[in-house]
Amino acid sequence: MSERRVLLIIGGGIAAYKAPELVRQLKAKGLAVRCLLTAAAEQFVSPLSLASVSGDKVYENLFDLTDEAEMGHIQLSRDADLILVAPATADLISKMAQGLANDLASTTLLATDKPVMIAPAMNVRMWEHPATQRNLGLLRADGIALIGPDEGDMACGEFGLGRMSDPIEIAAAAHALIEKAPARTSEPTAPPALAGHKILVTAGPTYEPIDPVRYIANRSSGKQGYAVALALQALGAEVHLVSGPTALNDPQGMRVTRVETAQEMLHACQASLPVDAAIMAAAVADWRPSDSHDKKIKKTKSGLDDLKLTENPDILATIAKQGDHRPALVVGFAAETDKVETYASEKLARKNCDWIVANDVSQDSGIEGGVMGSDENRVHLITQTGTQNWAQMPKVHVAQKLAHEIATHFTPTKETR
Ligand code: PMT
């Protein structure tokens, strides 16, 4: 029997923070999990952490045309053996009971013919309210399975029924239900757009050691690069992620090579060739200390006057120059603080890449705290055919749009041919 799949719809309640653990527990039961977040849920759990733990794209917005073109809400519900709503908020329960369909979660729930289980979580008074109990009665009559809620202390400070059940219990109940469900029969679908394509992605900073305790680094978190790797994987690509030191978990289902220095990153990238495309989102240190010190450098009056720097190899330019092994598509990222498009275009030409994604990493970019480390980005995609100026959006969405452009480049659609 093929792998059984759960579509996990995450509602916007405090219990949404347990969603990554629930995904882990479902996967431990041998179930594949795809996540769908309501707009409110995004306030409690990040799409990137769910994408990392599920190893799949995270769906969020009904009106994302890219998503609709690749996987409409009907297909989302057809591709699952079970739809699990956790946490099921009072609002989501009410929408389900009334048959409302005004966002991706409710539309998918209304479009499904698959078993549905809900794990409610809400304040005890909301749970006890006659309206909620009436709605639950309607859902039970519709054949929807229920797990929990449990009794206990609540985030709001009250005590009573309304806590979402433990992820281990929810996963066990979901597994038992899915075992009883008939095997999925979905219409044959076209292979994902990037199936059969090998893609190298770099992400994060590099650390260049000064001595055993100090290093030169930058503020890159790896979020943008990891999101790109996941978005390409979701379109079927075989992704090799080469990452500098980050606090992020390894995305599942792809090869990940952890490196520290620019030289190590270069070697890992070269060893990955041949690939069809290379997407270089890492913030590689331009310089490294010339001398390696085995012992901690002593603090002296002259400070670090003796610190001499050597230029690091340019990984992007090296990969873009490889004769026979040059990937068919080489995409650089450019981190600029002024004249963003101009400097990025110069880098595109100087480093011989095909496209460059330019982002403004200055403190006045309009993104709170700056692009590096934050969840948002605003980029310009510069290609041979011109420049696209994308609005500010979550890095996950930048990654999905970029992955879509890459897929279109390799397999042009009728409109773009
Ligand atoms: O990691 P996040 O916190 O999510 O932030 C994302 C980001 C801002 C780091 C990312 O979007 C980004 O812009 N990455 C590239 C950062 C950078 O190093 O830019 P650059 O303009 O210095 O370099 C241009 C290109 O050359 C990049 O593709 C870089 O990977 C590459 N390069 C640079 C120097 C070097 N020695 N070797 C390289 O390959």
Image: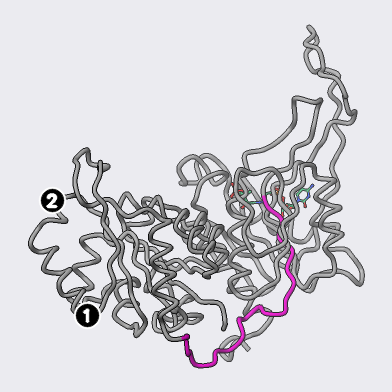
Magenta region, main secondary structure: loop
Which of the two labelled residues, at mark 2 and mark 1, occupies the earlier sequence position? 2
Is residue 281 rendered magenta in the image? Answer: no
Extreme residue toward the left, this view: 130
Residue 81 vertical position relative to residue 285 in the rendered view, above or below: below
- The segment highlighted magenta reads 183-203
Residue occupied by mark 1: 142
Q: Quadrant of the N terminus?
A: bottom right
Q: Which amino acid, mark 2? A: Arg
Q: Find residue 276 and report its image quarter.
A: bottom right
Which residue is the extreme one toward the top? 301
Instruction: Give x and y (percent) for residue 90.
Output: 21, 60
Task: Relative to 211, say whether 254 is above or below.
Answer: below
| Image quadrant where residue 361 sits | top right
- What residue do we see at 47% from left, 61% from top? 391
Residue 287 placement (x, y as % from top left): 80, 37
Instruction: Provide the residue designation for mark 2.
Output: 125
Q: Quadrant of residue 167?
A: bottom left
The image shows residue 43 at horizontal and vertical percentages of: 36, 51
